[in-house]
Image: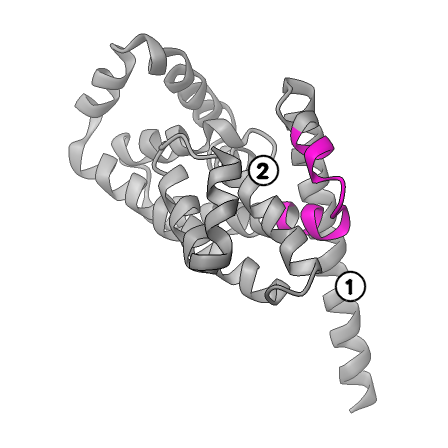
Amino acid sequence: MIDTLLAFVPTYGLWLIFACVALSCLAVPIPSSMLVMAAGGFSAAGDFAYWSLVLFSFSGFLLGDQMAFLLARGAGAPLITRFQARPRFGKVILKAQRLLEQYGAFAVILTRTIFGPIGPYVAYVSGALKTPWVRFAPASAFGAFLWCVGYSALGYVFTGHIEELAQLISSSVGIVVAGTSTLALAGWLIGNYLRALRVQQRGE
């Protein structure tokens, strides 16, 4: 599927990435992390600005995440019951519930970085269990920002080795490695930006 999606990037550009990321946040099986990482390689090649990739992917993530939360909030606990009744979703919903019980809002951040595949279900569970929006939204936005910056930066920095990265991330160990790399790269980029901002302010 990723090859098909990438073939459409030259035609539909960043709007395709926006739509794919939003749909993946609704638990539609789209390899959005691989797509954003590959798009980071396109950005390094000069096809579009890196900041625009982050902006479009981040906007799509926010839209999809909020839609999942609000849809589940409207449906309530019966939605989770229906999910649990299906073999495909029962275990992942249980994992999402346990993470929320154990870590609260921090689980939202974790499942948008290190444990990304569970992310959509945490959004659904959070909404269905009536988690206050003011607790969910900031954690969701922060985790989404780390995810978008991290995966796009992986593609940007390691362009030419994206296929190897994709194979690594497809394994369970790779998911943790990629999540950790996402956090590290995002922290590095944010730190550099803040240092540059301080230097600029001192110069003024």
Q: Position of residue 157 (x, y in %)?
A: 76, 51
Q: Amino acid at mark 2?
A: Thr
Please tell me which residue lies in front, 95 or 86: 86
Q: Is residue 122 left or right of residue 185?
A: left
Comes first in the chain, label 1 or label 2: 2
User: Disc 1, disc 2: CB below 8 Å?
Assistant: no
Secondary structure of residue under mark 2: loop
Residue 63 colored in magenta in the image: no
The Cα–Cα distance between marks 1 and 2, rounded to whole angstroms, is 20 Å
Please say whether residue 112 is visible from this viewpoint: no
Q: Is residue 51 above or below residue 155?
A: below
Residue identifier under label 1 = 192
Query: Magenta segment, which residues?
Result: 151-166
Q: Position of residue 140 (x, y in %)?
A: 46, 46
Please tell me which residue lies in front, 167 or 83: 167
Magenta part mainly helix, strand or loop? Answer: helix
Identify which residue is drawn at 21% across, 17% down. Answer: 82
Secondary structure of residue under mark 1: helix
Identify which residue is drawn at 37% across, 44% down. Answer: 65
Please tell me which residue lies in front, 204 or 91: 91
Residue identifier under label 2 = 113
